[in-house]
Image (cartoon, rainbow, N blue to C red):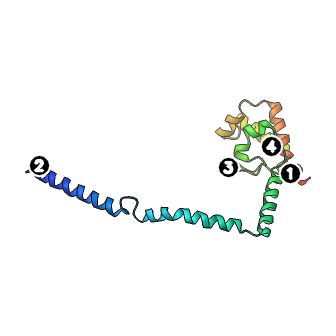
Amino acid sequence: MKHIIVASLTVCILFLMGYTYKTGRAFQGGEAGKIIEDIDSFEKRENSFAQNEDNSQKDALKSLKDKAGNLGAFKVSKLYKSRCASCHGVNGNGIIGPKLFGQKADTVYNKLKDYKTGKIESPVMRGILINVDEKNLKMLADEIGMFATIVTK
C-alpha cells in the first residue's frame, strides 16, 4: 500500500513539473521572467537619454568634477595615506573618523601623543600609532595643520 501511494505521488509531481515546464513562465521565473526579457530594451532607451543630454548639463557636470578634483588636489605624505586617510579622508574631512581639516598642528600633535600613550582611549588609534616615532608624529601633525592653508591658496 505504501508503495502505491509513493508511486502515485511521484507520477503527480512529474505531471506538474512537465506542465509548468510547458507553460514556461513559472518554471523560468514567473513574472520576473518578463522583466528580464525587457531589460535589453530598457537599457537601449536609457542610453539614448544619456546621449541626448544638452551642453549645459555637461558643463555643469564637468565643473562639479573639476571642483571635486581641486579639493583633493593637494598632496599628502605616504605616512598620512597609509595611517590616516582611510578613516579621516585624504582631505581630512572625515569618513568614519572625526574631521581633521582646519585643526591646528599643536592640537593634533598633542592628541596623537595622547592616543599613542593611551591617555585617550581608542584601540584603533593606538594600534595605528604604536610604531610611529615622535618625529613622524610631529610631521603628521604639521601636515594636518597645513590642510586649511593649502586649500585656501
C-alpha gap between disc 2 and disc 3: 64 Å
Neighbour class for label 1 at 10 Å: few (<14), some, many (≥20)? some
C-alpha gap between disc 1 and disc 3: 20 Å
Q: In which quarter of the image is residue 79?
A: top right
Task: Name the residue carrying label 3.
Answer: 96
Residue under the point 76% across and 70% down: 54
C-alpha gap between disc 1 and disc 2: 83 Å
Upstream in sequence: badge 2 or badge 3: 2
C-alpha gap between disc 4 and disc 1: 14 Å
Kindly indicate whether the residue at mark 2 contacts the one at mark 1 (C-beta within 8 angstroms). Answer: no
Residue type at mark 4: give it. Val
C-alpha gap between disc 4 and disc 2: 80 Å
Task: Name the residue carrying label 2.
Answer: 3
Residue type at mark 1: give it. Ala
Residue under the point 89% across and 50% down: 149
Q: Foreground mark, 2 or 3?
A: 2
